[in-house]
């Protein structure tokens, strides 16, 4: 074994070592889908009783999801609220829109695949309820379309519809920008999932939770039924529906599904 | 016969003596000392042709020390003998003449030794010629007197400084080296047409500190195509250069496992004058070398690692010092034109009869660039005068001016390129979906003046230098498109305004450095001890604003700093020999860094905003926080001292081989924006270890220097690039382990430099790879030169061919990604006839569509009316396609 041998061996060994290793994680594409609650029955209306005792039969429930994002940031609590774009690394995104049938438990695939990285794990999921530019003052895209009937305990029926759009609303001078339109269109919910090299991202939206605290009796009549308004100041049911639409309390749930 | 000053007969540095008893045989070493300090006019080994154009001096391959003759021991006196050596075309000493005699026995000892010297012969026009050089020998008596006088040892080249790169060194002698008299024709000279008379002068370079100390003579490798002086760094191993900021933006330098960004981890200097900019907002230590005219670079010393006590702040990955000089005397005018509207005019002037370190140069340059938004215009001027202080030393005065205006294509998203939304060489600023009114780019200028002197007083060499630098820079960069400027809760409702950064830096630097190097003898060996200092003060103003895309007006101030920075370094450096083949070099350095920073935009957020008086859109806030007022600015001051031990052990018991082991600690000061009042400056510290072996010898008439080095480094706080703020931010600790192989082979008609670096860089906490660090870098520079078998109008023609080959292996990128590898070839050909020269330069000969830099991070350049892309995406800056340039040069004068 000559010195030359050892030098060559070391060089070759180091050459191999230099090429091995990773910075961690992996950038990849993945399928993404959205669906209604798992206990819904395809082709059937969704019946349920709200916290206020209303028996609701939903015959139509469609949500337009403009995009999905997953971020590594810790959820922020506090009075100031978070920015629309979160700090930290976005670990997943699905930037194509999809109209989700909330009455179907079957996942519907987004038109294009999502992109993301396997590390770090996501701690925040964002549902972007927009038809285009998140900061556009006006957006005529119907975000939430509902139809159904709500019965109270006395048997009074309130057939209702909703065709919700999200536009900029007036802001107070003192707190300009405190509730910018992008913040109205983005729902940020806590999650705990990591993107895997197989499977896909599944968003389930439970329309039953959209009606928490909604008093259908205060809806404004329109023609033969009642209508939710896109203006939160219109009435109590509309305000609550819009608040529930941006709720972090279970309307939206992200998971990683091996079946996609 | 006319006198000609040409390159000194460069010798392997450091004496080699085989027998301890022959302690007195310091002649060769002392001779070099005299070469260094005696005559005065030229600095480190460069040719200074006068009447004979383009004469390159002979280069020592082997030298043999003279033995102090026993017959002279009784007197035990110091003595000097000056010889004239005639070196024939084969590099052998064909004739020795005693020019200055000491005593017959001493003369004889010197002659016996000198006859054993061998050289790479002197060159004229690439052809070996006979030459005559002066070599002073200094004899110093041994202490104690030797009992046995052994014959002189066989020659041993010291590999730390290859013969092809060697320069005279201040090797100590017991007695002060006396000035070497000016050259005079030796007796019975060879025919004048064949002999180049050599007048040797020089300055002492620092002692070599191990296998990673690369003292790079540019020489004929200057013919290899290089876009700027930074690319000369590629002659050192492990260098990768990228640039996503345009031609006026400093190159991003990767050195042996370090992402040194724009110089923050490398101490750059030119003739000892610092280039790193302390307090530059774009990166503390930002180093832009574009002000250096490449043709005026004589040599480059690159130390890969912090092993020399002279290395100061920023010497984390290492240091690079450009030595300026102009070999060709006379007036040279050169014009280059070629691809993409590129034009360059260059004027060089080296007054005949003056030192090659006396020169003037000016350059104007413009290009449309090889793609969108890549145009640049610049003007540069450099001048230096070197004079003598009688026979005791030299002084230099150097001035420099440089200004440029340029644009930058920035980075391209891979998905946009693959979808055909943007071209490979395009820029978002000029693309179909551009929204920026102000394209990326900037302005940069640098003006400096320096004066230095080196003199010898008794047995001590003194050096002093003062310098003043005025530096201004503006950078417009947008790495993220429209990602970051989003609606914040307490802002007025607004649309996305874009992420364009407008960064301005204005800096004045004053400083000085100096050293005293004492030469003595102990243990029968020459010993050296040096004390030195370095001091600089920087007054830096820097602002960074964000520009609105649609109007170009600033909408936000990110940073507004006024900094007063100080750096005082003191060092002690020893060069100790226990025997002739064991050499310990090193010492300790202490750097004190002071910060006095006024942050004019210290308050940018409000902890408890009032709903009745929200901050809205102000950047730098005067506010009420829970009822307590505060101003937007804040003064912060602190200081720290870093103590940096450094040592190298060089062992060379066998002829031609030298082994070395080195340890060193280095620091990089942090950005002023990170300091906290009275909290000690958190230096980023590096500990570096390496072991290497070198071979210096002669292979079939060509001089060969080959090295093999294993190294490991650790950094406690590394910088990690953050694209959102456009600069590096402090990160965690990292480790690097690797191997370097390098060789330089210089013959009578060719010059080859090749190196290979393999390195693995990992984070200390996760042991994952450090992103962007190339694991494999291979570089080859080759030049062939010869007189052609053609004559035009009775005059010979000379030709030269050069080739530069670069291979960079895949680089790890964030999120487990890997970049593409790159392989490029640059070439040139020149034809010289009389005083005229034409040339053809082709860069990227294979027209490879390669990516100069690749990154993974979030950006969004086109998300109007659609959801943005927020996950990391591959970004890249395009490497230049094939470019072809023609050059025309004429030289007049030069006698």
Image (tube, rainbow, N blue to C red):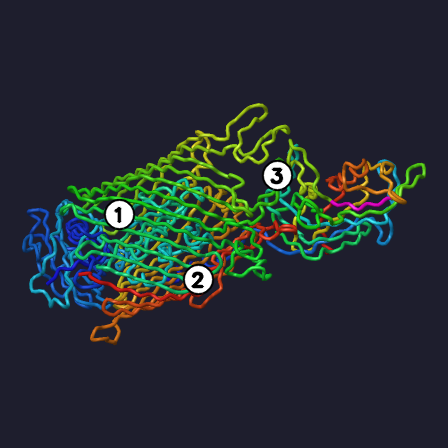
Disc 2, SS? strand
Chain letter for mark 1: B
Disc 1, SS? strand
Residue B142 seen in this snapshot: no
Q: Start and end of the magenta stretch?
A: A160-165
Left or right of B46 on screen, residue A64: right
Q: Nearer the viewer, residue B169 or B431?
A: B431
**First in residue order: circle 3 vs circle 1:** 1
Whole-number angstrom distance, CA of label 3 to CA of label 1 = 52 Å
Left or right of B420 on screen, residue B462: left
Whole-number angstrom distance, CA of label 1 to CA of label 2 = 37 Å
Chain letter for mark 3: B
Q: Mark 3 packing: few (<14 Cα in 10 Å), some, or many (20+)?
A: many
The residue lying at 45 percent from left, 61 percent from top is B370
Q: Mark 1 packing: few (<14 Cα in 10 Å), some, or many (20+)?
A: many
Q: Main secondary structure of the magenta part?
A: strand
Left or right of B689 on screen, residue B790: left
Instruction: Identify the disc placed on residue B488.
Output: 3
Disc 3, SS? loop
Whole-number angstrom distance, CA of label 3 to CA of label 2 = 46 Å
Q: Nearer the viewer, residue B232 or A64?
A: A64
Residue linked to disc 2: B807
Q: Are marks 3 and 1 on the same chain?
A: yes
Chain letter for mark 2: B
């Amino acid at each position: 074994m000559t010195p030359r041998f050892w030098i060559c061996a070391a060089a070759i060994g180091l050459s191999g070592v230099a090429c091995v290793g990773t910075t961690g994680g992996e950038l990849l594409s993945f399928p993404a889908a959205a669906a209604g609650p798992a206990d819904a029955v395809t082709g059937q209306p969704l019946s349920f009783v709200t916290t206020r005792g209303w028996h609701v039969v939903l015959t139509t429930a469609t949500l337009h999801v403009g995009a999905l994002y997953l971020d590594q940031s810790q959820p922020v609590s506090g009075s100031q609220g978070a920015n629309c774009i979160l700090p930290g690394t976005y670990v997943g995104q699905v930037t194509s829109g999809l109209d989700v049938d909330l009455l179907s438990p079957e996942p519907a695939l987004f038109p294009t695949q999502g992109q993301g990285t396997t590390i770090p794990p996501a701690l925040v999921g964002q549902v972007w309820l927009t038809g285009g530019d998140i900061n556009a003052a006006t957006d005529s895209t119907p975000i939430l379309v509902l139809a159904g009937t709500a019965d109270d305990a006395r048997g009074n029926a309130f057939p209702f519809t909703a065709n919700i759009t999200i536009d900029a609303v007036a802001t107070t001078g003192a707190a300009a920008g405190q509730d910018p339109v992008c913040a109205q269109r983005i729902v940020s919910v806590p999650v705990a999932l990591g993107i895997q090299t197989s499977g896909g991202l599944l968003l389930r939206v439970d329309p039953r939770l959209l009606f928490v605290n909604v008093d259908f009796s205060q809806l404004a009549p329109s023609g033969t039924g009642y209508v939710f308004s896109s203006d939160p100041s219109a009435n109590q049911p509309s305000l609550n529906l819009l608040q529930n639409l941006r709720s972090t309390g279970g309307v939206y749930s992200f998971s990683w599904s091996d079946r996609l | 016969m006319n006198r000609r000053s040409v390159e000194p007969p460069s010798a392997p540095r450091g004496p080699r003596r085989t027998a301890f008893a022959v302690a007195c045989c310091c002649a060769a070493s002392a001779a070099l000392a005299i070469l260094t300090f005696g005559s005065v006019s030229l600095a480190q080994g460069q040719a200074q042709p006068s009447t004979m154009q383009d004469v390159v001096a002979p280069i020592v391959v082997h030298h043999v020390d003279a033995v102090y003759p026993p017959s002279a021991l009784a007197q035990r006196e110091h003595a000097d003998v000056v010889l004239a050596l005639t070196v024939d075309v084969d590099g052998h000493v064909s004739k020795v003449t005693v020019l200055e005699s000491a005593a017959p026995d001493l003369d004889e000892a010197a002659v016996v030794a000198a006859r054993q010297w061998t050289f790479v012969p002197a060159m004229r026009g690439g052809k070996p010629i006979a030459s005559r050089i002066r070599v002073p020998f200094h004899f110093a008596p041994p202490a104690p007197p030797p009992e046995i006088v052994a014959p002189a040892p066989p020659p041993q080249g010291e590999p730390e400084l290859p013969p092809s790169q060697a320069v005279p060194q201040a090797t100590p002698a017991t007695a002060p080296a006396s000035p070497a008299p000016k050259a005079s024709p030796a007796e019975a000279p060879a025919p004048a047409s064949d002999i180049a008379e050599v007048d040797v002068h020089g300055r002492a370079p620092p002692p070599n500190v191990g296998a990673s100390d690369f003292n790079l003579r540019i020489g004929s490798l200057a013919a290899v195509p290089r876009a700027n002086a930074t690319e000369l760094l590629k002659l050192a191993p492990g260098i990768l250069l990228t640039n996503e900021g345009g031609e006026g933006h400093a190159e991003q330098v990767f050195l042996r496992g370090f992402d040194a960004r724009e110089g923050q981890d490398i101490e750059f200097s030119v003739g000892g004058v610092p280039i790193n900019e302390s307090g530059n907002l774009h990166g503390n230590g930002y180093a832009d070398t574009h002000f250096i005219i490449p043709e005026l670079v004589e040599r480059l010393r690159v130390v890969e690692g912090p092993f020399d006590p002279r290395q100061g702040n920023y010497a984390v990955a290492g240091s690079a010092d450009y030595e300026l000089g102009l070999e060709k005397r006379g007036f040279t005018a050169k014009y280059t034109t070629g691809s993409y509207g590129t034009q360059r005019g260059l004027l060089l002037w080296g007054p005949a009869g003056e030192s090659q370190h006396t020169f003037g140069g000016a350059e104007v340059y413009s290009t449309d660039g090889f793609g969108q938004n890549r145009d640049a215009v610049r003007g540069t001027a450099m001048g230096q005068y070197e004079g003598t202080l009688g026979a005791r030393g030299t002084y230099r005065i150097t001035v420099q001016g440089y200004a440029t205006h340029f644009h930058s294509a920035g980075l391209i998203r891979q998905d946009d390129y693959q979808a055909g939304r943007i071209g490979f060489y395009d820029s978002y600023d000029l693309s179909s979906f551009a929204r920026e009114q102000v394209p990326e780019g900037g302005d940069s200028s640098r003006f400096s003046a320096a004066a230095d002197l080196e003199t010898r007083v008794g047995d001590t060499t003194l050096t002093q230098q003062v310098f003043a630098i005025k530096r201004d820079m503006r950078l417009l960069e947008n790495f993220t498109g429209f990602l970051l400027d989003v609606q914040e809760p307490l802002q007025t409702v607004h649309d996305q305004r874009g992420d364009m950064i407008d960064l301005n830096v204005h800096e004045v630097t004053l400083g000085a450095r100096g050293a005293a190097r004492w030469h003595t003898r102990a243990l029968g060996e020459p010993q050296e001890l040096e004390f030195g200092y370095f001091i600089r003060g920087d007054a830096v103003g820097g602002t960074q604003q964000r520009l609105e895309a649609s109007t170009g007006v600033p909408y936000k101030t990110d940073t507004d700093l006024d900094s007063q920075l100080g750096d005082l370094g003191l060092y002690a450096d020893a060069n100790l020999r226990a025997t002739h083949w064991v050499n310990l070099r090193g010492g300790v350095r202490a750097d004190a860094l002071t910060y006095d920073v006024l942050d004019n935009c210290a308050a940018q957020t409000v902890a408890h905003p009032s709903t009745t008086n929200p901050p809205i859109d102000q950047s730098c806030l005067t506010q009420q926080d829970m009822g307590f007022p505060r101003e937007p600015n804040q003064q912060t001051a602190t200081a720290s001292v870093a103590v940096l031990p450094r040592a190298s052990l060089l062992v060379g018991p066998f002829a031609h081989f030298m082994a070395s082991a080195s340890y060193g600690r280095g620091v990089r000061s942090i950005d002023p924006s990170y300091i906290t009042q009275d909290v000690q400056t958190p230096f980023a510290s590096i500990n570096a270890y390496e072991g290497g072996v070198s071979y210096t010898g002669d292979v079939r008439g060509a001089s060969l220097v080959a090295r093999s080095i294993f190294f490991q480094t650790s950094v406690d706080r590394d910088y990690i690039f953050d694209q959102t703020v456009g600069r590096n931010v402090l990160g965690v600790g990292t480790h690097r382990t690797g191997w370097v192989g390098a060789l330089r082979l210089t013959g009578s008609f060719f010059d080859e430099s090749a190196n290979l670096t393999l390195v693995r860089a990992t984070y200390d906490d996760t042991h994952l790879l450090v992103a962007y660090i190339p694991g494999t870098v291979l570089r080859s520079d080759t030049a062939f030169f010869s007189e052609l078998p053609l004559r035009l109008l009775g005059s010979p023609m000379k030709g030269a061919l050069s080739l530069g080959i670069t291979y960079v292996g895949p680089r790890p990128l964030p999120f487990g990604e890997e970049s593409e590898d790159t392989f490029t070839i640059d070439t040139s050909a020149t034809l010289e006839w009389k005083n005229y020269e034409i040339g053809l330069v082709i860069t990227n000969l294979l027209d490879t569509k390669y990516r100069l830099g690749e990154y993974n991070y979030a950006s969004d350049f086109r998300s109007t009316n659609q959801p943005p892309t927020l996950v990391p995406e591959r970004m890249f800056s395009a490497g230049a396609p094939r470019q072809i340039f023609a050059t025309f040069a004429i030289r007049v004068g030069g006698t």
